[in-house]
Image (tube, rainbow, N blue to C red):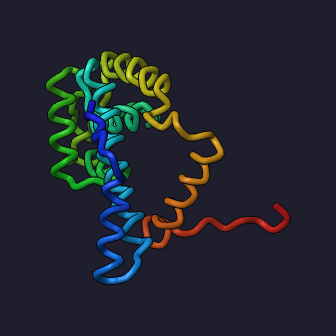
């Protein structure tokens, strides 16, 4: 887990003040810098909570994705697509999980050249235990109310739609 900075001032506010003096106010600069720092904090806290299980958050996400699949197995390309990561990252993640006995590779019966990653019983067990640990710490976001968390989710959904991750959902009239 990371260490708090314990600074006597907010370095992002200080950076924004300097930015404003040089280039003009930019709420976007302050927001993106805050998001990047939040990501550092969250990855540190989540990876710290997952360390006793021999996992990082990236490996945990892959295990959860496999538990959500009907058969417990997915093609590596599908894993990368769903986790929104580069194929090299998927290969590295699956290599690590396979080395831990949490996942096994097997041929894809519907694609002669393809490979499936399949979660093992040990992988399912670790996923359940790790999920309990993350749930007990509110995924390191316990300082927010449920309403704030949903609002945060909606704000980032807007960014992801604008970027083109997926189309804006169509809302039925009268709802």
**Apparent side of residue 88 relative to residue 2 in the rendered image (left or right):** left
Location of residue 116 (image quadrant): top left
Q: Position of residue 132 (x, y in %)?
A: 46, 20
In the foreground, 135 or 7: 7
Locate the N terminus and report the quarter of the image it occupies: top left
Question: Which residue is most to the bottom?
Answer: 23
Q: Position of residue 64 (x, y in %)?
A: 40, 33
**Apparent side of residue 10 relative to residue 132 in the rendered image (left or right):** left
**Apparent side of residue 9 relative to residue 146 in the rendered image (left or right):** left
Question: Which residue is most to the right?
Answer: 174
Q: Position of residue 51 (x, y in %)?
A: 25, 24
**Apparent side of residue 60 relative to residue 151 in the rendered image (left or right):** left
Q: Residue at x 61, y 40 (%)?
A: 145
Q: Residue at x 26, y 34 (%)?
A: 3
Q: Is residue 42 above or below residue 173?
A: above
Q: How many marks?
A: 0
Q: Residue at x 85, y 65 (%)?
A: 174
Locate the C terminus and report the quarter of the image it occupies: bottom right
Location of residue 117 (image quadrant): top left
């Amino acid at each position: 887990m990371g260490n708090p900075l314990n600074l006597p001032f907010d370095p992002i506010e200080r950076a924004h003040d300097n930015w404003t003096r040089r280039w003009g106010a930019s709420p976007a600069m302050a927001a993106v810098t805050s998001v990047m720092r939040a990501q550092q904090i969250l990855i540190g806290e989540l990876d710290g909570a997952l360390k006793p299980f021999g996992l990082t958050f990236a490996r945990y996400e892959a295990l959860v994705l496999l538990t959500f699949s009907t058969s417990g197995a997915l093609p590596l390309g599908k894993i990368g697509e769903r986790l929104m990561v580069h194929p090299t990252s998927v290969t590295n993640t699956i290599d690590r999980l396979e080395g831990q006995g949490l996942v096994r590779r097997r041929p894809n019966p519907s694609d002669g050249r393809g490979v499936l990653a399949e979660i093992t019983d040990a992988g399912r067990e670790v996923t359940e235990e790790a999920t309990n640990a993350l749930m007990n710490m509110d995924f390191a976001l316990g300082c927010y109310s449920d309403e704030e968390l949903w609002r945060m989710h909606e704000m980032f959904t807007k960014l992801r739609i604008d970027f083109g991750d997926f189309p804006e959902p169509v809302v039925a009239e009268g709802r």
